[in-house]
Image (cartoon, rainbow, N blue to C red):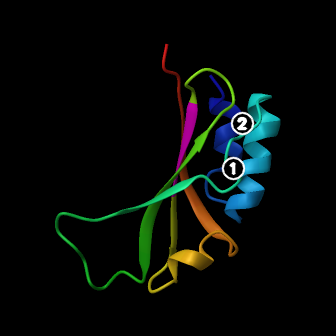
Amino acid sequence: MYEKEFRLLEGRDISLIELGRELENITGYSIIDSTGELQRSIALKPNFDHDWETYTATYRLNHKNDFVDAVFTTQKGQKPERLKEVPVTIQLLSYISRV
């Protein structure tokens, strides 16, 4: 649905608040929470050599039950409360429509 626009954001370093604004511009719908709902992804087989951690931010749209999932990485050991302020690396954006 918004694949071309999402691909332009993937790989960029951007704060979650800025990402929320970009998603509003792309979809044309306002977002309920400007930073999304954060959830850390835990690997089944952790690699302790990695210096990054993976998270998912779910941005709920004020349009039916649609939402956007943003998978991003950040420096290992980053405090969760700071994730909303510091730039993160966007890995994948997915638009999910619940009809």
Name the quadrant containing residue 3. top right
Q: Quadrant of the N terminus?
A: top right
State whether residue 4 is above or below residue 56: above
Taking the magenta stretch, the answer to whether it contains residue 58 is no
Say which amino acid is labelled 1: Leu
Q: Which residues are magenta?
A: 67-71
Q: Nearer the viewer, residue 95 or 12?
A: 95
**In the rendered structure, which amino acid carries the disc numbered 2?**
Glu
For residue 76, what is the image quadrant? bottom left
Examine the structure image and report whether residue 70 is included in the region drawn in magenta.
Answer: yes
- In the image, residue 71 lies at what x, y percent? 49, 53
Percent position (x, y) of residue 42? 29, 65
Which structural element holds mark 1? helix
Residue 87 in the image, given as x and y percentages of width and height:
68, 72
Residue 48, compared with residue 19, is above or below; it is below
- The furthest residue to the top: 99
Discs 2, 1 touching: Cβ within 8 Å: yes
Question: For the point 45% across and 86% down, which residue is it?
Answer: 77
Q: Residue at x 77, y 39 (%)?
A: 24
Residue nearest the viewer, comparing 29 with 92: 29
Q: Residues within 10 Å of mark 2 (few under 14, many from 20)?
A: some
Q: Viewed as shown, does residue 84 lie left or right of 96?
A: right
* Nearer to me, 67 or 46: 67
Q: Residue at x 74, y 59 (%)?
A: 17
Q: Which mark is residue 5?
A: 2
Q: Which mark is residue 9?
A: 1
Question: Dot 2: what SS?
Answer: helix
Give the image location of residue 13, x and y in percent. Answer: 68, 66
Q: Is residue 3 above or below residue 33?
A: above
Around disc 1, counting alpha carbons within 10 Å, would you say few (fewer than 14), some (14 to 19), or many (20 or more)? some
